[in-house]
Amino acid sequence: MKKTLFPIVVLVLAVLSCAPDRDDEFQLPPAPAAPDFSVEMLAGDSNRVVVKDLSEGNFQRLWDFPGGSPKTSARAVDTVLFAKKGEYVITLFVSKKDGSGSPSASKKVVILTDAPVTCTPKMAMLTGDCNPLGKCWTFSRDAGAVKVGPTYDDFSWYTSPANGLQNEQYDDGFCFVFENLVFQNRNNGASVNPWNGYTPQAYDPGVSEFVFLEGTGILGRDQIVLPDDQFMGVWDCDNVLDVVKLTATELIVRGRQRAQNGTPLAQGWFELRFVPQ
């Protein structure tokens, strides 16, 4: 029995003798406090809220406004539009200057009514004079129907040639109806999937709604906002579109390139050119 126990005891002692020394003076820094921010309704507007970062020592910040416009922001103070009534969650993420962590905080805001909508001249051009049948737009067959580049004003990555898109893209109609603000992607049963080698695939986008905002985009441009699961033109373009040009015969929009999960990419913009279908 002694011969059996002896090597076991030696092994235990050897393991214990290799245990690392403790450094009782080393301590992790305390977890950073959650950021503080305020949310106030904009005076005279029941659909816009003003958010303000009240915390100190932030190196970077990122606001997340699901269902709002803009969708995200890095400003210390910003105004957000929630066009549809409902309950929304606003989240602020921050990075601390001392590198101690990246805390976040969230608050709820309740919007009681839908934003009022009138048949303005711009809305009339988008929807076909606001008539009950609406108006459908399709890709232009001219060169430059699709442009892609790294930034908002740089489309150096790609410019489509004349008639350079797929047939399944030219037969798509993107339709806007003023009454009830209805949007429909009439894709004839198939859409080109950019995450699968740009191959057409069976897809039913369904019927949804849209919001047309005047002056809320970059450089004060108007915006078309679609639901997060919808798109206009190309599937990997974001659902918030700046209107570069809108006439009775031409619609040009710009939007961020987005990942398959719907998240806008840090780099990549589209410019898309449409004509009445």
Image (cartoon, grey):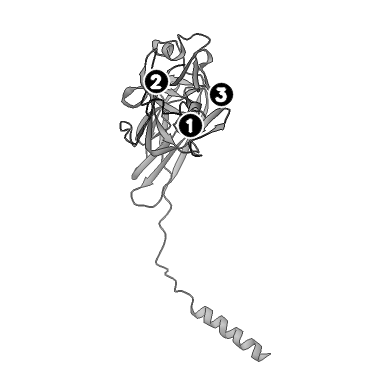
Residue placed most toward the observer, 153 or 162: 162
Up the image or down, 236 lies above or below 277; here it is: below
According to the picture, the residue beneath numbered tag 1 turns out to be 235
State the separation of the CA atoms marked 3 and 2: 45 Å
> Element type at marker 1?
loop
**In the rendered image, which quarter is residue 79 located in?**
top left
Q: Which mark is residue 43?
A: 2
Tags 3 and 2 touching, CB below 8 Å:
no
According to the picture, the residue beneath numbered tag 3 turns out to be 188
State the separation of the CA atoms marked 1 and 3: 15 Å
Between disc 3 and disc 2, the foreground one is 3
Residue at the (46%, 74%) spot, across then down: 20
Residue at the (65%, 88%) spot, across then down: 4
Q: Residues within 10 Å of mark 2 (few under 14, many from 20)?
A: few
Q: Name the spot of residue 74 as percent of width and height, x first.
A: 36, 36
Q: Name the spot of residue 116 as percent of width and height, x first.
A: 46, 15
Residue at the (39%, 52%) spot, across then down: 100
> Element type at marker 3?
loop
Tags 2 and 1 touching, CB below 8 Å:
no
Q: Please, what is the three-letter code of the amino acid marked with disc 1?
A: Trp
Between disc 2 and disc 1, the foreground one is 1
Q: Residue furthest front?
A: 163
Q: Quadrant of the N terminus?
A: bottom right
State the separation of the CA atoms marked 2 and 1: 37 Å
Residue placed most toward the observer, 258 or 77: 258
Q: Name the spot of residue 226 as percent of width and height, x first.
A: 48, 25
> Element type at marker 2?
loop
**In the rendered image, which quarter is residue 129 located in?**
top left
Q: Which mark is residue 103?
A: none
Counting residues from the N terminus, which is met first, the one under dot 3 or under dot 2? Answer: 2
